[in-house]
Image: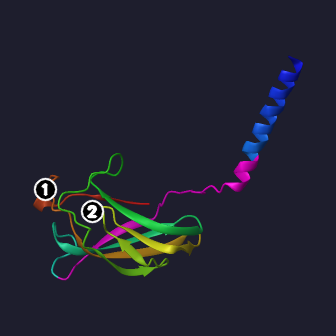
Amino acid sequence: MIKQRAFLALFGVATLLLGISLQLFIPSAHVSAAQITSRSLTLQAGTSAGGSQPGGVVNHLFSFTLPTAGTISSIQFEYCTTADGTCTTPSGLSTTGATLGTQTGATFSTLNTATNGAPYVTSSSGVTITSGEAITTQLLGVTNPNGTDCTGTLDNCTFYVRIS
């Protein structure tokens, strides 16, 4: 009985040490985020429509400051009818035909528009940013929401874009 208890105790210690040592060899991803407090979206005229025209094909210029330094691989722009909670894409909005325009502060190589209302820019090698770095990213050829899911004058309504 004593030998069995000693064996179980030794087995337990060995298992614990094995678990701790495996953590040294298995890489884990480190992810962190901080609130982007300085941000804006400027609706710019497109080739045939004014920037704030409901349903118009226009350009969207995002300006924001990233609060912490680091390397980032992507930034997503998620268009929603509300600022928080579940995100519902505004009626009439189309981002699937958008292209990447001018960029400052951080340059991404690709714009992924596969999911309407949630385009994102990527860089396969990552982009290094400094703390407090001002960034602008322009999306060309975005179709504005058409205003049918809100009340207001001349179909104008508020929509939100979550930057992550």
Q: Amino acid at mark 1?
A: Thr
The residues colored magenta run 21-47
In the displayed structure, 4 sits above or below 79; it is: above
Residue at 44 percent across and 71 percent down: it is 122
Is residue 40 placed above or below 140 in the rendered structure?
A: above
Mark 2 is surrounded, within 10 Å at the Cα level, by few (under 14), some (14 to 19) or many (20 or more) other residues, namely some
Q: Is residue 115 above or below residue 7?
A: below
Q: Amino acid at mark 2?
A: Asn
Q: Is residue 117 left or right of residue 102?
A: left
Q: Position of residue 86 (x, y in %)?
A: 33, 46
Q: In which image quadrant can residue 19 be found?
A: top right
The residue that appears at 29% across and 61% down in the rendered structure is: 117
Mark closer to the observer (2, 1): 2
Left or right: where 46 falls relative to 3: left
Answer with mark 2 or mark 1, whichever residue precedes in sequence: 2
Q: Is residue 134 left or right of residue 161?
A: right
Q: Which residue is mark 1?
A: 148
Q: Which mark identifies residue 29? A: none
Q: Would you name the residue on which mark 2 appears?
A: 116
| In the depicted structure, whether residue 93 falls above or below residue 43 | above
Q: Identify the colour scheme used.
A: rainbow
Q: Position of residue 110 (x, y in %)?
A: 40, 76
Which secondary structure lies at badge 1? loop
**In terms of image quadrants, where is residue 31?**
bottom right
Q: Nearer the viewer, residue 96 or 70?
A: 96
Residue 28 forms part of the magenta stretch: yes
Q: CA distance from mark 2 to mark 1?
A: 17 Å
